[in-house]
Image (spheres, rainbow, N blue to C red):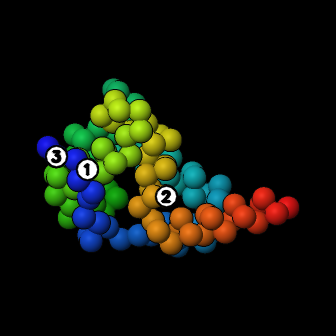
Amino acid sequence: MASQTPQHSHFHDSLPFMANKLGGDGLIDELCNGFNLLKDCDKEVITFESLKRNSALLGLNGLSDEDLFSMVMEGDFDGDGALNQMEFCVLMFRLSPELMEGSQLWLEEVLQQ
C-alpha cells in the first residue's frame, strides 16, 4: 500500500472537548486507555490489523483500510510498522489541529513562568 496522508473527513475530533473536560492528566489517561483498546495484546503495539479490528471502539469504523494503514504509517516514527504508546499519543495530538494550537499556547505559558 502506498503511504498517503489519511482522509480524516470521517474522524470526529473530540480531543479538544476531552482536554477541556478532563484536564491534561485526564486526557493523557484517556489516550492511554484508547491505546490499550487498539493495541495487539501479544505485541503490545497498535498494528494495522489491531487498529482495523478495534477501530469501531473509537468511532473510526467509517475509515477505509487505506486510511487506517496511512494512520499507522503517519504515526510510526521508528519505522517498525506499528505504533507504540508514545507514537499513538503524538499521532492523536497531530490529528487534532485545535488541540495542537492549544498545546502551543500551553507550552508558551509554561515557558513564560
Label whose residue precedes the other's in the sequence (3 or 2): 3
Q: Is residue 74 left or right of residue 3?
A: right
Residue ranking furthest to the top: 42
Query: What residue lies at 41% left-to-right and 70% top-to-bottom?
Result: 13
Q: Which residue is mark 1?
A: 70
**Amino acid type at mark 2:** Phe
Q: Which residue is mark 3?
A: 2
**Quick one: SS at disc 2?**
helix
Asked whether 79 or 31 is in front, the reply is: 79
Q: Which residue is mark 2?
A: 93
**Amino acid type at mark 3:** Ala
Q: Tell me if label 2 and label 1 are in contact, CB under 8 Å.
A: no
**Amino acid type at mark 1:** Ser
Front: mark 3 or 2:
3
Q: Quadrant of residue 95?
A: bottom left
Q: CA distance from mark 3 to mark 2?
A: 23 Å
